[in-house]
Image (spheres, rainbow, N blue to C red):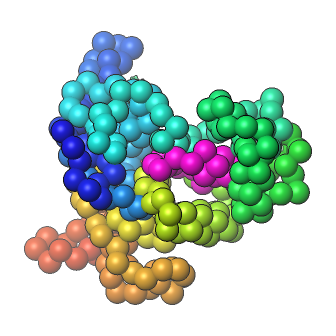
Amino acid sequence: MRLENGIAIKASQLSQSFRRADGQLVDALSSVNFEVLKGQFVCLIGPSGCGKTTLLQIIAGLLLPSSGILEVGNQVVTRPSPERGMVFQKDSVFPWMRVINNVEYGLACRGVGSGERRAIAEHYLERVGLAHVARAWPRELSGGMLKRVAVATVFANGASVLLLDEPFGALDYVTKRHLHNVLLTLWAETGRNKPRTVLFVTHDVDEALILADRILVFHTGRIVDDLALVAPRPRTTDTLLMPQMVQNKHLLLAHLGLETKQAGTGATSSIVRAAND
Ligand SMILES: Nc1ncnc2c1ncn2[C@@H]1O[C@H](COP(=O)(O)OP(=O)(O)O)[C@@H](O)[C@H]1O
Ligand SMILES: [Mg+2]
């Protein structure tokens, strides 16, 4: 089976069930099908517990699906690979290694020589604005700086598929916006020689609208919407005011249960439902 040229990731009838401690089966993913093009920046959005992390773990090769097939670059994924880099929701940095050693660790594991890996690590630390803390310990860095280290590391490793699981979820607005710029700049730059396909999980609607070429909306283990965002880049706060973006924002908020859909019109009202969770 060969993926068509241009397709980076393909999920076919992908399902994952877990048995909970009380013996009940939970369907984290139910017959999920999608294709992602090479170089595409895709955001996954959906309420907590809808299977986003499970999907990223399967793509990373950390979890084998209960059924169905997940292919990356013409190969069925059965184990982790340096071609697929993941930034986890929580810490992605080893606390016992200095910053520079963290960034070059993956390269060292793959036998890249010390001079070359140091140069690559220094390059990406500089790109994320952390050259001055290369010799520091992670405990000396702020939360935003640690996320920069994680971004530098995943790019230094040279993966062609980047799996980012709510990487900036815990950060303040300003730090988050800076990191969006850093991430998008690196993604666009490396795209010319070697396209980097990004799957970025978020529950932040504005973050998805700023970052994504496409947004996959998940609900209880299924894809319930697939939105293409054609707004030009770089995107700014003004971009978010474009009619297409405003419409998509309402649609996403409705999917997240924060706005009610008006029957028959396809539009959403701005009545915010009382939080029910
Ligand atoms: N290892 C596990 N064992 C049992 N249940 C799990 C496990 N991992 C995830 N789940 C369940 O699968 C569902 C999807 O989880 P997850 O993929 O983490 O969702 P999300 O990332 O969208 O919040 C949830 O109901 C969660 O409780
Ligand atoms: Mg999750």
Percent x, y of residue 76: 29, 33
Give above or below for 78 relative to 137. above
Is 157 covered by the magenta stretch? yes
Percent x, y of residue 37: 32, 59
- For residue 103, say whether it is visible: yes
Front one among 155 and 48? 155
Give, as a single range, the part of the protein colored magenta.
Answer: 146-168
Determine the residue positioned at 67% across, 52% down: 152
Residue 175, quarter of picture: bottom right
Percent x, y of residue 66: 26, 24
Q: Residue furthest left?
A: 264
Give above or below for 130 relative to 262. above
Front one among 193 and 45? 193
Ligand 1 sits in quadrant: top left
Classify the position of the N terminus by image quarter. Answer: top left
Front one among 94 and 115? 115
